[in-house]
Amino acid sequence: MRRCGLIKNLIFDMGGVLIGYRWKEMLTEDFGVEEDRAFPIGEMLFEDPIWRKFDAGLEPMETVLEHYVELYPEDATVIRRMFYEGERMSVKRERVWDRVRELKNSGYKIYVLSNYSEYLFKKHTKDVTILPIMDGIVVSYVTHSIKPDHAIYRYLLDKYGLKAEECRFFDDNEDNVNAAKELGMEAVLITSEEMLLKELE
């Protein structure tokens, strides 16, 4: 397979790209939360500043969980389940994984660059069968910096000796995509699994 232009390295975000998320379905279908309550619960968790510290490896899971439970005692049971049963949140994208394997076999180097706490990364990726084929994995809890901070991108480039202009980056967050472009990478905003599969063609 002919590689496009100078691109030699494909860099993937994890959540929303290599795996899907079903946090709303986890709340409503698995935990029985009413739909009009499910979104505010997710919003209060993911938008709280402590979540970024959690992803950056600056706060342990126990501290983060205690913070949420103290702030939202009426939702304490559901919040605890979201953490302790976190593996329910991720969705396999096996068609994407098969395509990534094909690209790896055709000569591309494959990397992961993702914002994740150590606790949830392990829960969400335990069934991600393509991790062993990756040429490199950089996760925010290791670097203590998170996308779109340029530092985590530079960490990946430096660690694996990559040239930005030879990289194509796939992420579901526009700010993260723009940061990659600012550093000289090609970058694609992923809005669905089908869109990602089309891009990988």
Image: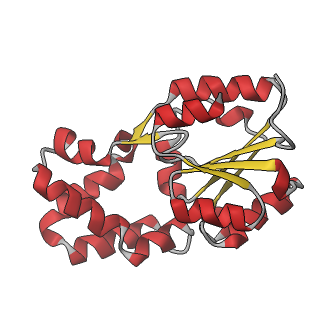
Residue 196 location in percent, x, y? 55, 36
- 178 vs 85, left or right, is right
Image position of 102 with respect to 78: above or below? above
Image position of 70 with respect to 15: above or below? below
Q: Residue at x 50, y 74 (%)?
A: 53
Q: Residue furthest front?
A: 5
The answer to which image quadrant residue 130 occupies is: top right
Image position of 49 with respect to 169: above or below? below
User: What's the coloring here?
Assistant: secondary structure
Residue 97 location in percent, x, y? 60, 28
- 198 vs 47, left or right, is right
Q: Residue at x 16, y 71 (%)?
A: 73
Return the residue nearer the eye: 157 or 59.
Answer: 157
Quadrant in which the C terminus is drawn: top right
Residue 66 location in percent, x, y? 31, 72
Return the residue nearer the eye: 198 or 173.
Answer: 198
Image position of 44 with respect to 95: above or below? below
Q: Residue at x 29, y 65 (%)?
A: 43
Task: Count every numbered label the image shows and give the total.
Answer: 0
The answer to which image quadrant residue 40 occupies is: bottom left
Return the residue nearer the eye: 168 or 29.
Answer: 168
Residue 48 location in percent, x, y? 36, 74
